[in-house]
Image (cartoon, rainbow, N blue to C red):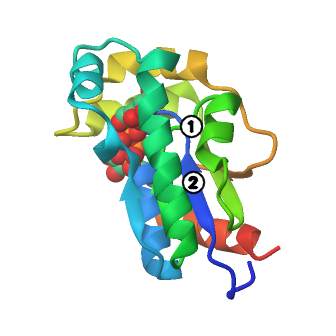
Amino acid sequence: MNEHINPVIFVMGVSGSGKSTIGKLLSLKLSLPYFEGDEYHSPENIAKMSAAQPLTDIDRQVWLESLNQLAINQGKNKGCIIGCSALKEKYRKTLAKGVSQPVYFVFLEGNFEIISQRLQNRKGHFMPPALLQSQFEALQIPENAIKINILDPPEQIVNNIIQNLSH
Ligand SMILES: Nc1ncnc2c1ncn2[C@@H]1O[C@H](COP(=O)(O)OP(=O)(O)OP(=O)(O)O)[C@@H](O)[C@H]1O
Ligand SMILES: O=C(O)[C@H](O)[C@@H](O)[C@H](O)[C@H](O)CO
């Protein structure tokens, strides 16, 4: 990645794939601000997920638009990293629309078993492991993304991402 551009990097994947963990570490390494997509959900969306009901396309629309606005604003600034599930191709189009700086999607790729195990062990998060199946059902594997295997430790994953960004 050319250090003179202000990239907008979306770290994407199903719930529990490691978006927050990796996004924050990448943010430290690249000196770019990290924004947590979960913090942009409406209280209604959070309540729905907490009650183990998957969000619909309509539920996600306003949320995706607010993250798109964030990407547009931060792209004009120094760039940023945003953690967002971005499960479907049309969501990724909404997220990237009108962003003048280069947009990258980093897809944290892992299977149901490993992510389910990580979610069972995670404490204090509203997203119940029971929703993981619906996340995989909604997921459309991105074609134009940097794909990263989540079995590696976080430090290694971040190094892999940086290596891929600089190609
Ligand atoms: N590479 C890794 N190796 C081992 N454990 C990891 C790794 N990445 C994340 N974890 C752990 O897996 C759990 C899920 O990670 P994290 O909360 O970052 O996922 P997320 O994609 O942000 O989830 P959500 O979308 O539900 O907010 C956490 O307990 C985290 O510590
Ligand atoms: O698109 C979605 O279904 C939601 O955004 C979820 O993925 C959550 O935001 C998050 O990942 C849970 O912590």
Residue ID at (45%, 72%): 27
- On the image, the x and y values in percent for residue 26 come to 50, 70
Amino acid identity at mark 1: Ala
Q: Quadrant of residue 117?
A: top left
Label 1 belongs to which residue? 86
Q: Looking at this view, is 66 or 2 the one in front?
A: 66
Label 2 vs 1, first from the N-terminus = 2
Where does label 2 land, which residue? Answer: 10
Q: Can you say which quadrant of the picture contains the N terminus?
A: bottom right
Q: Residues within 10 Å of mark 1 (few under 14, many from 20)?
A: many
Query: Relative to 93, is 131 above or below?
Result: above
Name the disc covering residue 166, or none: none
- Answer yes or no: do the residues labelled 2 and 1 have beta carbons within 8 Å? yes
> Badge 2: few (under 14), some or many (20 or more) residues near its Cα, within 10 Å?
many
Spot occupied by residue 106 in the image (x, y as percentages of width and height): 64, 53
Identify whether 91 is placed above or below 34: above
Q: Residue at x 42, y 72 (%)?
A: 33
Q: State yes or no: Cβ of the residue under disc 1 lies below 8 Å from any atom of ligand 2.
A: yes
